[in-house]
Image (cartoon, rainbow, N blue to C red):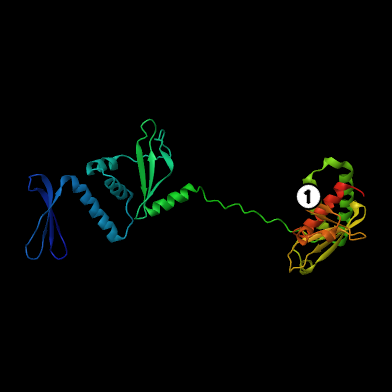
Amino acid sequence: MTFEYRDYYGRRLNLGPGADLDNNPVVELWTHGEYGVSIPVRVPLDRVEELVAGVRDAARQAAGQPAAAEDEMAASLRRDGFSNDEIADILRQPSADPTIADDPTPLRWGLNDILYGDDDTITVCMSGPAPDREPYWLELDPERAAVLRDDLAGPDEQPAVEQPAEAHPPLTDAERQFLTFALELAADQMYSRGDEFDDADDAAMARLRRIADGVGDKPADLLADCATEYHVPVPEGGGTTLLVRRQALVHGTGWAVSVPAYGGGRAWTTEGWQESISALSVDRLFCWPDAATAVDEARRALNAEGPR
């Protein structure tokens, strides 16, 4: 029994059983054109399913339809070396949902065990359960690799956006006065109670003083950028006034801090108190990176030495 297909122009395609030159059974395809010349195409029986799949795929492409999952799976299995009979058996088996399987086979993926093909495919190398650790691999085309990448990222969630800290409005004159008064009381307590406070407490006190002075926690304005000298009262230091000066810009950007007195006073440096300012080199005197740091360090030094 043969199958015959005739197109619009009367050309015929015949399919029927036959044999090759070695007398092996085959399926023969015959085409009949206008001049009666016909050359048979003999398809071995183990390649028939491949031919059928090819015809289906050609029809799908002609119709502009996406590939069916079964056709994709068959093509993948064929690339993996499965015979057509094995592929047919696999496709006839009901597909189990791996997400609800009772006892799925655990596969192990070694970190970085990934192969990248020239055709943009990605191959994930895996191994089966012990003791055999039978090797497995999963080949993904670019589209499936993109889907897997999204799946591994987890459910879509809006990333937590850190809210910027609320900017505090500048202190009013009354608030600044109260804050300064409170800091003076706190400084007296810190001095009288000695070792109960550490460097973190001193840093917190210095930060609050900068806020009270209107510097440090808000952007410097043009006037502050242009300032070259500050006179900073230190009530907790026995009424001492600190002289904070910036060196000439042609020489650098360092700051110096000193306690004025008859004969020049003394300077607080990274080496400690220096009683002879005139004997100091420029880099030893202007040793602080900014005015706030110079004031903080001098305040701490005055508090540590106590009344003179």
Return the residue found at the far front.
Answer: 279
Q: Residue at x 80, y 66 (%)?
A: 228
> Left of 116 or right of it: where is 221?
right
Q: Is residue 76 left or right of residue 36?
A: right
Q: Position of residue 53 (x, y in %)?
A: 24, 51
Check disc 1 and report its element: helix, strand or loop. Answer: helix
Q: Residue at x 79, y 43 (%)?
A: 198
Compared to residue 304, the image places residue 219 above or below, namely below
Q: Is residue 80 above or below residue 208?
A: above
Residue 294 seen in the figure: yes
| Residue 267 quadrant | bottom right
Say which of 81 and 233 sits in front.
233
Q: Is residue 206 left or right of residue 166?
A: right
Rate crowding at label 1 as few (under 14), some (14 to 19) or many (20 or more) other CA atoms within 10 Å: some
Residue 302 percent location from the top left of the image: 86, 51
Q: 135 or 32: which is nearer to us?
A: 135
Residue located beneath label 1 in the image: 203
User: For the residue marked with disc 1, what is the amino acid?
Assistant: Ala
Query: Residue at 7% of width from left, 48% of height from top?
Result: 21
Residue at the far top: name it.
131
| Image spot of residue 98 (x, y percent) | 40, 40
Q: Quadrant of residue 96?
A: top left
Q: Could you say where residue 8 lies in the image, as x and y percent from the top left? A: 16, 64
Q: Could you tell me if residue 186 is visible in this image?
A: no
